Amino acid sequence: MCRFSPLGLCLAVSLLSVPALAETVVPLKGQSSQQVQLDINDCHNVANSASTAPPVTGGRVRGAAVGAAAGAVGAQVRGNQHDEVYDRVDDDVKQEYRQNRAKETAAAGAVVGGSRQRQERREQRRTSESTNASAYTSCLQGRGYQVSP
């Protein structure tokens, strides 16, 4: 019959139970394999609850709003640069021109806003993963384990 030493058993259990983190957990206070497993699970829960940041939303809408405002202002500025012609144009035509420019730049703003939102989400995910790993390691070290990458 094959027998494992308590330390070898703890290492095997910790390696099998934490494949995503790929870390070695070594008990320093003689914890049993059941206690190691309980501590690992508890520390996973602590780490996962430590980083519950709200998701980044509204990037496209904000981008479209900024783009629409910029387009309308830009149209007005361009019109003011050509006062002699712009003053002879009907107010309805001026309004339609500003609205068309606002629509065009709103579409561009939505694209830019969506891109920024995706970038912020990626950054938030990286930060969250780093925070989780740090919280997990700190939790286990506080309970008397050595955690090695």
Image (cartoon, rainbow, N blue to C red):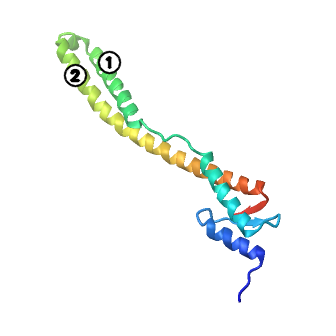
Q: Is residue 1 above or below residue 39?
A: below
Please give the label number shown on residue 97: 2
Q: Quadrant of residue 27?
A: bottom right
Residue 110 drawn at (x, y percent): 35, 36
Looking at the image, which is closer to me, 95 or 31?
Answer: 31
Looking at the image, which is closer to me, 57 or 97?
Answer: 57
Please give the label number shown on residue 77: 1
Q: Earlier in the sequence, mark 2 or mark 1?
A: 1
Q: Amino acid at mark 2?
A: Tyr
Circle 1: is it few (<14), some (14-19), or many (20+) Cα within 10 Å? Answer: few
Viewed as shown, does residue 27 lie left or right of 94? Answer: right
Q: Quadrant of residue 136?
A: bottom right
Residue extending farthest to the bottom is 1
Q: Quadrant of the C terminus?
A: bottom right
Q: Amino acid at mark 1?
A: Val
Residue 50 drawn at (x, y percent): 63, 46
Q: Is residue 102 above or below residue 135?
A: above
Q: Quadrant of the N terminus?
A: bottom right
Circle 2: is it few (<14), some (14-19), or many (20+) Cα within 10 Å? Answer: some
- Helix, strand or loop at label 1? It is helix
The residue located at (22%, 17%) in the rendering is 95
Q: Is residue 69 above or below residue 114?
A: above
The residue located at (70%, 56%) in the rendering is 137
Looking at the image, which is closer to me, 69 or 8?
Answer: 8
Residue 85 drawn at (x, y percent): 20, 14
| Label 2 to label 1: alpha-carbon separation | 12 Å
